[in-house]
Image (spheres, rainbow, N blue to C red):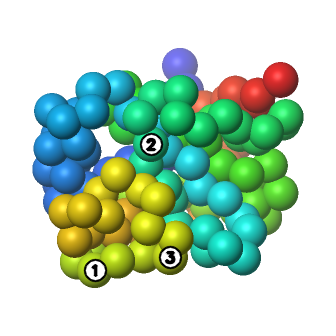
Amino acid sequence: METTISRLSATEKALDVIYQLEDQYGALMFYQAGGCCEGTQPQCFEKGGFFPRMNDAMIGTINGHEFWIDRDLFEYWKYSHFTLDVTDGFGPGGFSLETPLGKTFKVQYRLFTKEEYENLEPVKRSE
């Protein structure tokens, strides 16, 4: 039986920040836009605090929290594994929940191997 490959993971540093945000806000969600204002850094919101657009892609969950990306950005990055990380400082926009902590979520990418790509978990699309 083939093992399905996850499209998404998180570093321990990112998980530590997520635990802090969970304690403060409860259920969370992530959205990575492809626009100029938000940059391409993931934003963290309270669950339901942002509504994905039609056909945006949910590529996985982190600690049970959905991670959505812009439909056009997904087409560009669909061959890549996303690793959610965090860094000190303020990212573009400042709307993400980690901003008051002096942190910014970021994503590190790596290309899937041919074998991984053939066995990826399916994505969920918004309707």
Label drawn at residue 45 = 2
In three-dimensional space, the C-alpha distance between marks 3 and 1, rounded to whole angstroms, equals: 10 Å
Which residue extends farthest top?
A: 1
Residue 12 falls left or right of residue 71? left
| Amino acid tagged 1 | Gly
Nearer to me, 24 or 79: 24
Which residue appears at 65% of the width and 49% of the height?
69
Query: Residue 5: horizontal and vertical position, in percent?
Result: 52, 39
Query: Residue 28: horizontal and vertical position, in percent?
Result: 39, 33
Vertical side of 125 occupied by 59: above or below = below
Task: Kindly indicate whether the residue at mark 2 contacts the one at mark 3 (C-beta within 8 angstroms).
Answer: no
Mark nearer the N terminus (2 vs 1)? 2
In three-dimensional space, the C-alpha distance between marks 2 and 1, rounded to whole angstroms, equals: 18 Å
- Residue 83 appearing in the image: no
Q: Residues within 10 Å of mark 3 (few under 14, many from 20)?
A: some
Residue 55 falls left or right of residue 18? right
**Residue matched to label 1:** 89
Which quarter of the image is occupied by the C terminus? top right
Disc 2 is placed on an element classified as strand
In three-dimensional space, the C-alpha distance between marks 3 and 2, rounded to whole angstroms, equals: 15 Å
Residue 69 falls left or right of residue 2? right
Vertical side of 20 occupied by 110: above or below = below
**Residue matched to label 3:** 92
Q: Residues within 10 Å of mark 1 (few under 14, many from 20)?
A: few
| Amino acid tagged 3 | Pro
| Amino acid tagged 2 | Phe
